[in-house]
Image: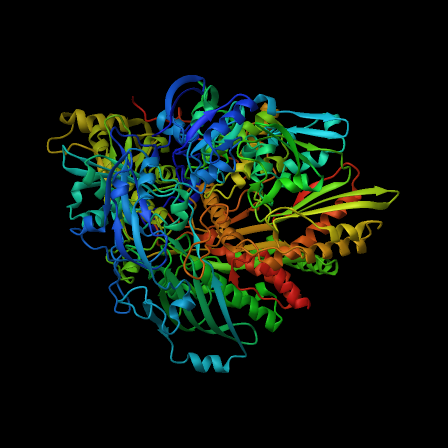
Amino acid sequence: MTGGVEARAPAGERRWIGRSLSRVEDHRHLTGGGSFVDDIAIPGLLHLAFARSPHAAARIEAIDAEEARATPGVEAVLTAEDLSALQRFVPMLNRPDFVPVETPLLARDRVRHVGEPVALVVASTPHAAEDGAERVRVTYERTDAVASIDAALAEGSPAVHDDAPDNLLLDAVFKDDPEIDGVLDGAALVVEATFRSSRVTAVPMEARACLAEWDGRTERCRLHSSTQVPHIVRTSVAGLLGLPEHRLRVIAPDVGGGFGQKCVVAREEVLTCIAAQAVGRPVKWVADRQENLVADFQGHEQRYEVRAGFTEEGVLLALDAQVLTDVGAYSNHPFTCGVEPLMAAAELLGPYTVRHYRCRTRAVATHKTPMAPYRGVARPQLVLVMEGLMQRAARRLGIEQSEVRARNLIPDDAFPYTTAAGLRIDRGSYGESLARCVDALDLDAFRERQAAARREGRLLGLGLSCFGERTGYGTEAFEQRKMAMTPGYDIAQLALDPTGGITLSVGTASHGQSHETTLAQIAAEALGVHPTVIDVRQGDTDQSPYGWGTFASRSMVVSGGATRKASLRLADRLKHLASHLLEAAPEDLELRDGAVVVRGSPSHSVTLADIGRIAYLEIHRLPAGEEPGVEARATFDPPGTFSNATHGCIVEIDPDTGAVAFDRYVVVEDCGVMINPMVVEGQVRGGVAQGIAAALYERVVYSDDGQPLTTSLMDYLVPTASEIPPVEILHLETPSEHSETGAKGMGEGGTMGAPACVVSAVNDALAHLDIELDGLPILPEQVLTAIQRARA
Amino acid sequence: MNDVHLITITVNGRPSEVAVEARRTLADVLRHDLGYTGTHVGCEHGICGACTVILDGEPVRSCLIFGVQADDATVETVEGLAGDDGLDALQESFSEQHALQCGFCTPGFLMLATALLRANPEPTDDEIRDAVASNLCRCTGYQPILAAVRQAADRAASPDTAGSEGNGWGVWEPHVDVPREAEQPGGQ
Amino acid sequence: MKPATFEYHRVGTVGEAVERLGELGEDAKLLAGGQSLVPMMNFRLARPPALVDISRVAELRYLTREGDTLRIGALTSHLAIERMDAPELLDGFSFLKEAAHWVGHYPIRTRGTFGGSVAHADPAAEWCLLAVLLDAEIVARGPGGERTIAAADFLLGFLTNALDPDEVLVEVRFPRPASRAALHEYARRRGDFAIVAAAVAVDVEEDTCRSARIVIGGVDDVPVRIGEAEAALAGSRLEAEAIEEAAQAAARAVDPASDIHGSAEYRRHLTAVLVTRALGEARGSEDGARSKNGAG
């Protein structure tokens, strides 16, 4: 049995799917019983600290570690010299327009960003390790740094890498429609604009942490790491260490948020293993907040130069785009620095039916911290671009902004819809979500209120953003990325134990997403058991099937699909075994309330615990030749499926300070079948908070010479409960045809939609002043300056 | 040489003697010397509040106090909240309102809100928001945390209304709780 | 982010503290609430070789009224000011209670101290502004006994005060009530240090402003009094035009620096906005002074 759409239980008959069950995860976190990497205590544990580059660009003339080694408590100091036997770490895309560059584990002859690790120090306490790290004497000869897209692309600017003299690590023409210039020339309205997004960083509340220990008995390394992708880490770290993979066990225990920052392999994960091997004792490294803000992966620094042609009715005909992404000094593995530029080019058009498209997309190397996926990956930016274009067209053509969007959204009779960029978008509720959002905000009443407020000198604005969220994509989609490894599928394994307990092992790795609860709901639905009977195992490469981890809003579709398929197989196996015990045909049996029951004859049943006991402990009671055990395994590898949503908000701008305050924030979202609506809403609210943060508060700032200026949480402004408004959420449900449960992924939508929505609202508030802001974040000072200029 | 001091500290009612280097913070001492790892460390400069504990009755950032300063002090941590009869009202409200996702910031918010509700058992929504704004959470968007504190306060004020109260932050559908004792696998 | 090594000394009295400071030399630092010092030590931006912990010196934890004067023991927590409820304390000083609410966050206010904040001498700190605004006197005790320093003379520069290395700040005195005082701040997030803060106090008799005081924080190394703005109000009826004139005078007088939180020009603009708002409130209030934080 393969599951599939027709095998899904109709909504009315669902027992566990669709219910806001409280989370299995909660109890341990509420009682202090969680186990994060830094909570792990091991006898003999040593601590690691890094000496990191204070310069953005410099040659290393000499490293003197003598004083560091002599520091009380210090056990070892390693520099690049000590790593010469290792494989080189070169993130790779197999495409001709990509320039591979090495990420040195420890800097050898050059440093290319502030915070680049230069030496590692192992000591008896974290304090002593820091004492040692500050005594590593490095003689640097500073060189000129390039710290912005413009600086990196300027004529004669220094090259970050010798292999990329023009500082381009990727330069791809994604689509080149030969008719586009003609269409643009003939368009009734051509909008030209440049949209910018500042660099931001994920700031998981738990910064990255690793604990490595070598087990002398088994000659294996065990790496505890705060990662979203344990198997990717195993494959990559084992490769760099030259180990067969079975000699490395990677465990992601409780992980305190990731948001993409932890879905790539960090140098520190490799180096902690190396350090533990070098000193022959377990070694732990816990990034402090300064390291997290300065040296861990960042993202979202993009610029879009676009030209868009509209009809007089506001229909978007053609879009010509140049995308520039500041990717920092190195590529990340395995996604590489192509992740944002290529996402931007593939998905820029969003849910709009523009037919003529051209896009050149470039990854620009700078002397800044490397970029990695961060929640949304280019989509918060491209939604900003498309919504900004819609709003400009509305303003120029004198059409209400919601109406312009409605005229361009994929119509309900056009699914599946293939975009001009070649993406296939499955059925969604694009038009309806927009209409519901406009209704929820009562646009007509708002316009009256806005006009009245303006007469009093108050500035109210209503913003909208419409978008689709590509989720749950499988091998076929990732293959097009040409990565060194091709993620996509995931595997679920189920086993009944002799007491009737069921273990579900998956290759995804929840770090806040509640999979221990939601995957259990999926399995429980198919197996007719209570969800608490299912124990979800994840995050340990010795216990989980090979899998790709949790990122890109993939887990509920891919792992959830595998879970459902495996559960249905386990159900078949249970029925098969029960058919012997009940002397009934398997097709006359059903699973209900923890037992296999003869349909229509509830007194004839056998519990799962009885089946488990017999299948393992009393196999003699089954016919000869029957295999012991009750297990099932399944893989799911979907083509991908699009969630959709419309965000709407009403803001008020303080004309004295430029500050933006929220009156309302509404999300109308459609992620297909909701496995657990409470969890869905949690993802929406958290995502919106990060989106608002990027819209109004957060930005990583560098000086012109590449010094980071936002190195504490006093300067990098993660908003608090006082800044984030309540979010009203309305749900639509268009079940996916491409997932086993009808669910679509939805982990990033909140972050994707919010920045554009907020910018839209601010611009709406300032429309009468003819102000159009187009960068993230919008700072109060910029708003104020724009108002002052408009009134001057 | 390192400056080490012998201190006596009472954590969740249990006194301990421990030798601490002067530069170890209270968070270090609780977590790594005494094993109370429920208190988390998120920034070490007093902004995120993940390390919030209750020291001699008041909420503090345990990353901004040296362990040696807590000599003879009484500390309450997240490990001490639940009683013999299970989670306390605030913990239950956090779960019901989905006020935690990754769980890393949760102990800090619980201790912060515990202190708030002791000092001010009937806080206004604004007072709750002001207090909750002391700490950072990256997962929830805060609204569920505000709702959880509101709910815990309301339940304490009128215990009969458990689970049925709406509140200013808009709680979603009536919550479905899973009784653990019910529907266990049959045939034990 | 682990502090460098230091020697820790706990003292029980001011006398012991002074003695210990004398023994340890000028690099030793006092540790009171630690809410500013410890983060700097965690970043290793401060690395004192020795700390003298005065946090348990009970004699420095008090709030008393003597006639017009409010005496605040140096170790009085921000929270104690926020919870101040005795009418004899509040009379004429309710602005302190209101302002306390804007000092950091709740778990910072439990631990941070009034004297520690003044001694830390951050130019945007609420207590520093109010001390300068209302001519507070800083009482310091050293080996030679006590001396009193005017707040304006105490705050010498960015994070720099007038204490000798072996002196302890023991008390801050507000010599007279201010029935019409207000503090307005602008910060991006709740609880952050103000980008700009304005503190004002006005004496009003029969609807006429006899005198006014205006102090701006966040625009210089120390809180600055703006005489030109004060002059614009004296003799006025605090009508909108006079307030506007004072606000513009203040904006002209300040010379702020730019940083990532705001340009000089923005700070100058905010100065006028906050002076206007603070004066509007002080005008309207009679000992009901409110302080506001315009977060955004």
Q: Quadrant of the C terminus of chain A?
A: bottom right
Left or right? Give the position of C287 relative to A369. right
Q: Quadrant of residue A546?
A: top left
Residue at the outermost front position:
C144
Task: Tell me residue A641's x, y (percent).
Answer: 38, 56
Instruction: Quadrant for residue C47, please give it.
Output: top left
- Lateral position of residue A8 relative to residue C281, left or right: left
Closest to the observer, A358 or A743: A358
Q: Position of residue A87 (x, y in %)?
A: 18, 53
* Residue at image coords 29%, 61%: A481
Q: Is residue A587 visible?
A: no
Determine the image quadrant of residue A596: top left
B113 and A101: which one is in front? A101
Q: How many marks?
A: 0
Residue ID at (88%, 42%): C206
**Farthest-out residue, left:** A624
Q: Is residue A329 left or right of residue A543?
A: right
Vertical placement of residue C77 versus A788, above or below: above
Q: Is residue A636 above or below residue A410?
A: above
For the point 35% across and 53% down, the residue is A472
- Report the front residue among B1 and A531: B1
Residue ID at (17%, 51%): A86
